[in-house]
């Protein structure tokens, strides 16, 4: 158990809809990173949030956006859903500026877009 | 792009040591070697990381060659629950992202 929680566990949406996924970071961590994992692939970095600001972004379009809250929890928002957005969405929390910034992952949210 | 090369699959008998190799011939002096594993449809689980010295924790040992161009993750007494995809990742401390490759699918056989 990493202490990183995600909700919901599973979600089904239709093409064109919008979705919000949530992540609560491990106690003491101040940074949240989001990853997308398509079936049979390794996770791909979407972006990272630190001190409520985006702190790095992967090769994902602007319809993928996020928020980090003062308690360090985070949301991932995806607008105008496409079929290819079907994937496991993972968040990972870490402590920036600590002696170690190892990322610890939550269990993920499985998103299906029909 | 991932900077590591791993065999796509490996088998190991239950109770034996599982040795998972990773090649990272272009590793930089300030890059750490991280290992994660992912059991089917779960989030990746952190195992261990190291810079140049060998490391051991309650889960595994990490052996890094002197030239740091390759490493081996050792699970000393594999159990069926160790069946998973194992990812070897090189990363500078402070870098935002982990770059995952295809990993090694380790199957522990009874």
Image (cartoon, coloured by chain):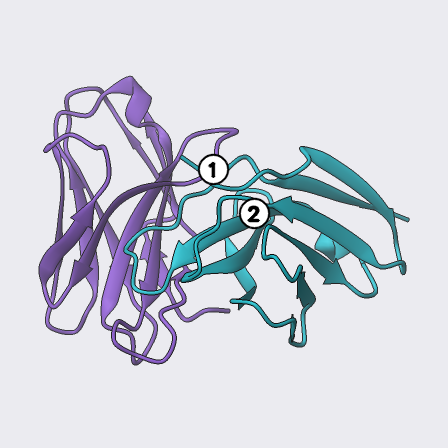
Chain colours: A purple, B cyan
Q: Please state the horizontal and vertical placement of residue A38, each as a whole percent of the image.
A: 42, 30
The residue depicted at 19 percent of the width and 25 percent of the height is: A81
CA–CA distance between discs 1 and 2?
9 Å
- Label at residue A42: 1
Q: Is residue B43 visible?
A: no
Q: Which residue is mark 2?
A: B87
Q: Is residue A36 above or below residue B84?
A: above
Looking at the rendered structure, whether the residues under marks 1 and 2 are on a common chain is answered as no
Callout 1 secondary element: loop
Left or right position of A45 against A41: left
Q: Residue at x 31, y 79 (%)?
A: A98
* Tag 1–tag 2 contact (CB < 8 Å): yes
- The image shows residue B36 at horizontal and vertical percentages of 55, 55
How far from the left and from the top, in percent, is residue B50? 54, 67
Give the structural element (helix, strand or loop) at label 2. strand
User: Badge 2 sits on which subunit?
Assistant: B
Residue A24 appears in which quarter of the rendering?
bottom left
């Amino acid at each position: 158990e990493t202490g990183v929680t995600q909700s919901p566990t599973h979600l089904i949406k239709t093409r064109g809809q919008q979705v919000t996924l949530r992540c609560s970071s491990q106690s003491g961590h101040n940074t949240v990173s989001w990853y997308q994992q398509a079936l049979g692939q390794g996770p791909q970095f979407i972006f990272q949030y630190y001190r409520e600001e985006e702190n790095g972004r992967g090769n994902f379009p602007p319809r993928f956006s996020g928020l980090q809250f003062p308690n360090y929890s985070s949301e991932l928002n995806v607008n105008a859903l496409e079929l290819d957005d079907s994937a496991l969405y993972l968040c990972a929390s870490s402590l920036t500026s600590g002696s170690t910034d190892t990322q610890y992952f939550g269990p993920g949210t499985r998103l299906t877009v029909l | 792009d991932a900077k590591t090369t791993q065999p796509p699959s490996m088998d190991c008998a239950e109770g034996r040591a599982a040795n998972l190799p990773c090649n990272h011939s272009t590793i930089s002096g300030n890059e750490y070697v991280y290992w994660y594993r992912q059991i089917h449809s779960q989030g990746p689980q952190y195992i261990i990381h190291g810079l140049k010295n060998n490391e051991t924790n309650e889960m595994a040992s990490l052996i890094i060659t002197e030239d740091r161009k390759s490493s081996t993750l050792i699970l000393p007494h594999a159990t069926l629950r160790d069946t998973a995809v194992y990812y070897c990742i090189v990363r500078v401390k402070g870098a935002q992202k982990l770059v995952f490759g295809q990993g090694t699918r380790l199957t522990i056989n009874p």
